[in-house]
Every structure is written in structure tokens, then in C-alpha cells.
Amino acid sequence: MSESFSILIITGSPVQPSRASGLAELLDRRLAREDFRVRRLEVRDLPPEALCHAHFEHPEILRAAGWVAQADGVIVVSPVYKAAYTGAFKSFIDLLPQFALRDKVVLPLLIGGTLAHVLALDYAVRPMLQSLDPRLIVNGLFILDKSIDVSTGVATLSPDVAERLEQIVDVFVDGLRAHRPSVNQRALGDVLAQAQWE
């Protein structure tokens, strides 16, 4: 029987539909096969004024921060704008507590138009995530946007990218099983979230 972990997928695209959302849906289905509890957070759905004006106490921001706290593992998916993650994504990260990823296993995924942006994983995303004190950051994956087809409304990946993504998700899952979150951190997340996972 599979262990039950809570996974939060955060997408940073400001538009809908998007390749980031399509990829998140694929990941949701992949993780559900192992009976993990998966929740998706689309940053663009959060109140813009709360993000732009740093309203830490806004109910929607508190709820989203609670989802982060409650998760055992976090997957972040963002398109690359100007050689880094999107501004909307960074605005949300800036509203999280200092050690929001403590005891968590994290998988970063970036989507970009050219391989010139591949270093954004190591020089932009990883340092930002590391500052939130995760237990483990799995080696991320940079995906060319042409490798994700969302023209039918359901995302499909090119075969080579699908294989690489499967491998990296396996590493993420192995990391979850090897680095179990503390009981205290999970209890804190339950309080902050004020909502049960489905």
C-alpha cells in the first residue's frame, strides 16, 4: 500500500490556459496514481491587490500559505520571463513565512522558449527556494515550451520530455519517502490550512 503524502503543485503563470497549468494537471494525475493527496495552487487566482501590496493577513493569502505548510512535498511550475520565474510567482513567495519549506521535499520545473534560459533553474529558482529552508530540493527540469502541446485543451508532452519528467518525478517521490516531514510541522500545516485535503 502506498504511503499517503500531501503534495502541493504551485503554478506561476499569470495567464490561462497555460503550459504551466497543463503540466500541473499532468503531474496531478501522475501523483494520484500513487494515492498521494494532491492540491493545485494557481498563483494567478490569488487576489492581485494582496500580492502587489503585500497583504500578508489577507484570508486568501493565509489559506494559500496554509496549503504550503500542510504539504509534505511542493512542486513549483513557472514559465520563464526575463531569465527567471514570473513576477506573480515571486510575489507569492515573498508573502510566505521565512521557513515556509522547512521539512519539505521540493521539485522545481521551468518552461521556457529557448535553452538560453536553462540556467535559471540553478541561478534564480534554486536559491529562492533554498532560502525557505527545504529539507531537499530535487534536481529540477527545464522544459522547452514547444515540447508541451495544449492546443486540444489537454496537455501532452513530447516523448523525450515525458520520459525525463517521469524520471524526475520518481526521484521526487523517492525523496518524499526518504525525508519524512516532522509531526510538528505537519500539525502546524493542519492548523494553518483550516481545510482538509480531499
Image (cartoon, rainbow, N blue to C red):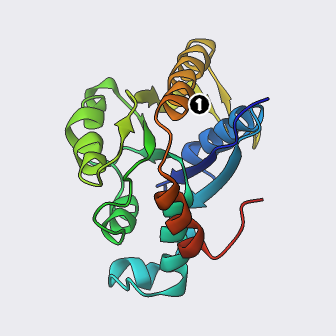
Give the quadrant of the N terminus. Answer: top right
Q: Amino acid at mark 1?
A: Ile
Q: Residue at x 29, y 43 (%)?
A: 125
Residue 32: percent from left, percent from top: 75, 38
SS at mark 1 in the image: strand
Identified at 28% across, 65% down, the residue is: 98
Q: Is residue 22 above or below residue 69?
A: above
Residue positioned 47% across, 87% down in the render: 58
Assess disc 1: are there few (<14), some (14-19) or many (≥20) residues with their C-alpha within 10 Å of its C-alpha: many
Q: Percent from the top left, x then y, of residue 179?
A: 46, 35
Q: Quadrant of residue 165?
A: top right
Vertical arrangement, residue 78 with respect to residue 172, above or below: below
Q: Examine the rendered structure and indicate whether residue 88 appears above or below residue 23.
A: below
In the drawing, does residue 178 fall left or right of residue 4?
Answer: left
The residue under label 1 is 148
> For this rendering, which residue is in front, 192 or 125?
192
In front of the other: 99 or 45 = 99
Taking the image as drawn, is residue 14 in sight? no
Tell me what residue is drawn at x 72 percent, y 61 percent: 197
In the image, residue 155 lies at what x, y percent? 69, 36
Q: 188 or 42, which lies in front?
A: 188
Residue 122 seen in the current view: yes
Quadrant housing the C terminus: bottom right
